[in-house]
Amino acid sequence: MLYTNPEPQFIHPKDKSVKDKIYQSDTIKQIIDYIFSEGLDEINTYVYQSSFVRLPREHKAWSYLDEGCRLFKVSESPVICLHRDYNMDVKCTGYNHPVILLPDSLLKAENDEILRIRMIAAAAAVRAEHHKLDFLIWFLEHTVGQVNKFFIGPLLERYLLSWKRASNYTTDRAAFIACQNKELAVKNILFGKIPISELEKFDFGVNGTFSGQTQEFFSQKGLMDIASSLYGAFQLETWLPKRYYELQKFIMEQR
Amino acid sequence: MIIENNPLLLTSLVHPLEYQTEKDCQKSDLFNWMTNTLSGLEMKLGDLTDNLIGSYLVTRNTYPRLWNLFRLAMKRLDCRETVPLFIKRGYELDAEIRGSENDGSMIILNDACLKELEDDELLALLGMQVGRIKAGHTKNLRFLDIMRSGMDSLPVIGSVIGRKLYSYFSQRKIASGYTADRGGVIAAGSVTAVIRLIRKQIGADFSFIDPMILGKQPIQTPEKMGMYYIWLTELLGNYGSIERIRELRSWVYSADFKEKTPYLHYTTRLYFEDEGTDKHDRDILLLHKRAQNGNYIAMGQLGECYLREKNGLPADPYAGVSLLKEAAYHGLGGAMYLLYACAEIGIAGIPKDKLMAEQLLRAAGGRFDNARKEAAALEKLVKFKGADKAVQIVIRKNPGGLSFRLNTDAVKDKLTADECGTIRNAFWMPADDEIIAAELHDSVDGISGLVVSQTGIYGRLSSSGFPFFIRWQDYAGKEVYQMPGDDGTYFYCNDKPFYRCPSVLKGSIGELLVTIKLKLAK
């Protein structure tokens, strides 16, 4: 095992710093108070309970989640709900009642090692309280973002989405901690983004198939900065080369 | 097995909660003002143009399977409005209705449904939309969407006001979903098809999901609901799916449902793995289970129970006839005899038809003792002096390269004994009538086609349709003509279609029938 106490290391510094800033904001505090006064967390739980089927406890995904909860010291297992999605990422939502959303496409892909590390990473996401900020993003997107689409909404969104993108780095790290396998951790980033049949031909080593694309991406630095500010600001997901780069950096740091 | 739907179920299409919420809405000045204003404007929303530009119109020629299912859904829900059906690209297993009072209604279906849904699930989905149209949702609920999009375009607070108003009618919207589900049940003739569809829609279509889980999953209803509930539900494509399944379940268990369609009641209870309340209930459930598993003797017994209200089961003639039909296709003489009685009077979808009744009696004669005497008397009437001539024409015809098969020793691919047995059952042929030639179309549901015999022509236009019989004397004496039908050109005799012509008549049994007709007429 590379790690005996993963907690301090697996949360990406940017994830932590942006999150701290968000929670220090008085506006965010007021919003959270409002959410609780309106019982929104309970409504959210109700909607998921009444709309999605819970994964039976006997399913192996539960044992992977339990493994993740033990590894990342999550005191109580969240609920796993199945949902239909072609995106194979495992997501979490809910404020005080975290719900893990497991896409049917991931189960149908029948890749046990990816399922395992994604469920463990989901536990890490709960440990890092990603579900809380995800819930806030949803709330702001559909309340303040709607009130003023041209100014306040985008500003808040940009603030929170900056955290959202950094949260991907944290789950990528958690996936690596789960499998202790560089190649598999890289494969996890690309799984579901690239056709699976093509992915099977990939070399996931340090100088592997995707490293060339990453170098090409970072060589466009001037252009990338502008594009990153203009286009990437409203993206929910981080660009793949960035995730690949951050993961490689994390792996190298551990040596 | 397709169970013909009991039309009585149509009277329960609109969910009671929808009636209630509709009344509540009508008490609201805001609702009445908006409804009156919008209908006063007599707007044309351009939905039809939108879809003609951006979606693909389904016709009989472009999507024959979908077209037939859609027509069936319209028929079963007794929808007489002209409703265009469009297909658009979409990943969700869903469809929607659009339109307005002035534009008329239309249905738009996502193309993923064609790839991923079974026929009965697709029928259920189409039935949900047709059910909505029947329940007046195009007219009554579309204005909510119009109101929302109108409010959204107001700067700064428009969308919040829109949502607030929208949430005011949220219960109505939710109740309308329950009505749509009932439409799906009526169209598909199956509750389980709707539940399977919902499970696929929410990604829970896995064998490891026990249907019982759906009923037991804990749901904690929050104290506050209001507009945030609607906002959240809008984000989820299929909100409240578990509640919808529970609502269907409670409908199935209601006295009204059991009385109107007991067969659906019992078979759906099997899906929920209901073990029965007492010995009698358990026995009845077991009989349904055996019938569902393809035991045709159980089908016959159950069919008789539903026709004659036996064993404490209420009457369900549509289910009874469907079960007897299936049992008869497996050669059960008793089922044929009961169906003969049905065709004598005309009941539950079986038309009053003397010829069909005769055919059933003749078929039952060799299989069921009680029918033997009556059938033997009838057999004499069927004999016709021109029969030998017709048979000779068939046998003389060179079978090489032709689509029909002869049943004589002179040919290499003579029908086997098993094939003859299947044909006799599928076409309800008497056991002693000799098969001369057959043109068969085999599908997963069964056989359709045409059989030439010593006494006449047996046919079945589709695997789900009734077989029929044309005696040689009718074939020689009555007019036979060709006419275009819904899905091709048909031969007609006695003003009934009996053979679907292939695109090239030459070499087919159709060509042979024309020849026989000409020769017999001389």
Image (cartoon, coloured by chain):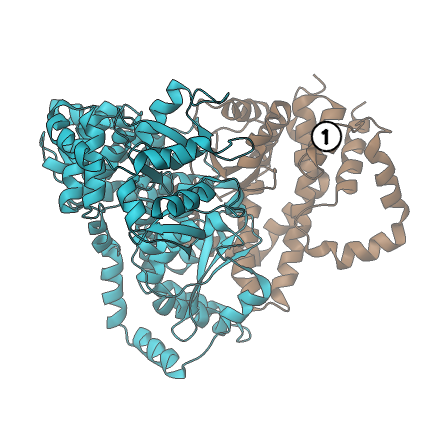
- The reply to whether residue A42 is visible in this rendering is no
* Quadrant of the image occupied by residue B450: top left
- The reply to whether residue A32 is visible in this rendering is yes
Report the front residue among A190 and B125.
B125
Residue B487 to residue B83: above or below: above
Q: Element under label 1?
A: helix
Residue B358 image position (x, y, % from top left): 19, 38
Q: Which residue is mark 1?
A: A187
Residue B155 image position (x, y, % from top left): 55, 75
Tell me what hue chain A is rendered in: brown
Please give the name of the residue rendered at 79% of the width and 41% of the height, measured from the top-left corner. A241
For the N terminus of chain A, the image quarter is: top right
Residue B481 image position (x, y, % from top left): 38, 54
Please give the name of the residue rendered at 38% of the width and 41% of the height, measured from the top-left corner. B462
Q: Amino acid at mark 1?
A: Lys
Q: Which chain is cyan?
A: B
Residue B493 to residue B269: above or below: below
> Dot 1, how many residues are within 10 Å of its Cα: few (below 14), some (14-19), or many (20+)?
many
User: Please, which residue is most extreme toward the top here?
Assistant: A1
Horizontal relation, residue B181 to residue A149: left or right? left
